[in-house]
Image (spheres, rainbow, N blue to C red):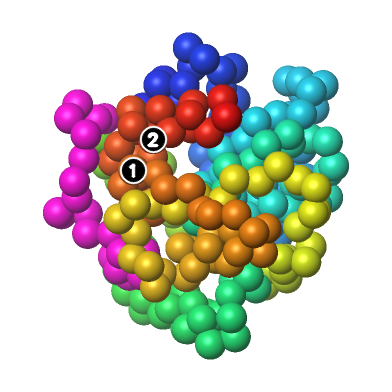
Amino acid sequence: MDLAGHLADRFTVVTYDRRGLSRSRPDDPAAPVSIRRHADDAAAVLRQVTDAPALMLGLSLGAAIGLHLLDAHPGAVGTLIAHEPIALRFLTPPAEAAARAQLDSVRVAHRQDGWRAAAARVAAVLGINPHEQDTEPGITAFPFTDQRAANFEYFLGNDLAAVLADTLTLGDVPAGAQILPAVGRTSPPDGFDYLAAQALAAHRSVAAHQFPGGHNGNLTHPRAFAQRVRELLAA
């Protein structure tokens, strides 16, 4: 991943394959998973590499996992950059209902027409046009290999259900936690992930930090994204 490479000269970068993805193969791939379980897994990874609170960059589902980490594993994370968390309970009731309808439409597309149709629906929901994206020069292409397709199938079949079932509210987020809510500069302002980040920021009486690109700015603008991470963690 380009982003990790742009951070590695400043930080010890730890990444992992989330439960069900790539090398993290569950005994029963059909077994349900929760965001809290993902947070428990992340805490176990951190215990293997450090005794100190980690600096965490959480993107989308990763941001929701980071928020659960703060709630369930105090001290595991020192600072969390929460970039557009998929946290539906952070939204107003009308916005939450709209988000659930959008995500249900992704599940319908997957069930009826397969992962490619679902991927197109996800992109539309997140305001991403994969054919007309502004990008930095020289970024690495990440085509949908068989492994990425299998990972996306797991997301559609397991993680999406976990997102819809998640009960984390703004009130569950520890008041004293160091959280930097973040949004993509070009993300649609009515997107549910953008709205969740703004709700988190408002709840903590801070402004959401802007990052280059949209929801997937870590892929389209990894160099500038890394620079923004450095700036925020140095403040």
| Location of mark 1 (residue) | 212
For disc 2, the neighbor class at 10 Å (few under 14, some 14 to 19, many from 20) is many
Q: Where residue 52 sits in the image (x, y, percent)?
A: 79, 23
Q: Is residue 25 left or right of residue 227?
A: right
Q: Where residue 95 sits in the image (x, y, percent)?
A: 51, 81
Q: What is the quadrant of residue 126 in the picture?
A: bottom left
Looking at the image, is 210 positioned above or below residue 8? below
Say what secondary structure mark 2 lies in.
helix
Q: Is residue 143 visible?
A: yes
Callout 2–callout 1 Cβ contact below 8 Å? yes
Residue name at image x 73 percent, y 53 percent: 68
- The magenta region covers 118-140
* Residue 137 drawn in magenta: yes
Out of 192 and 30, give the one closest to the viewer: 192
Residue name at image x 34 percent, y 43 percent: 212
Q: Is residue 1 visible?
A: no
Q: Where residue 129 sits in the image (x, y, percent)?
A: 22, 59
| Cα distance in 3D space between marks 2 and 1 | 6 Å
Amino acid at pointer 2: Phe
Residue name at image x 47 percent, y 83 percent: 98
* Residue 196 drawn in magenta: no
Q: Is residue 220 left or right of residue 161?
A: left
Q: Quadrant of the N terminus?
A: top left
Amino acid at pointer 1: Pro
Q: What is the quadrant of residue 223 in the picture?
A: top left
Residue name at image x 76 percent, y 57 percent: 173
Say what secondary structure mark 1 lies in.
loop
Nearer-N-terminus badge (2/1): 1
| Location of mark 2 (residue) | 225
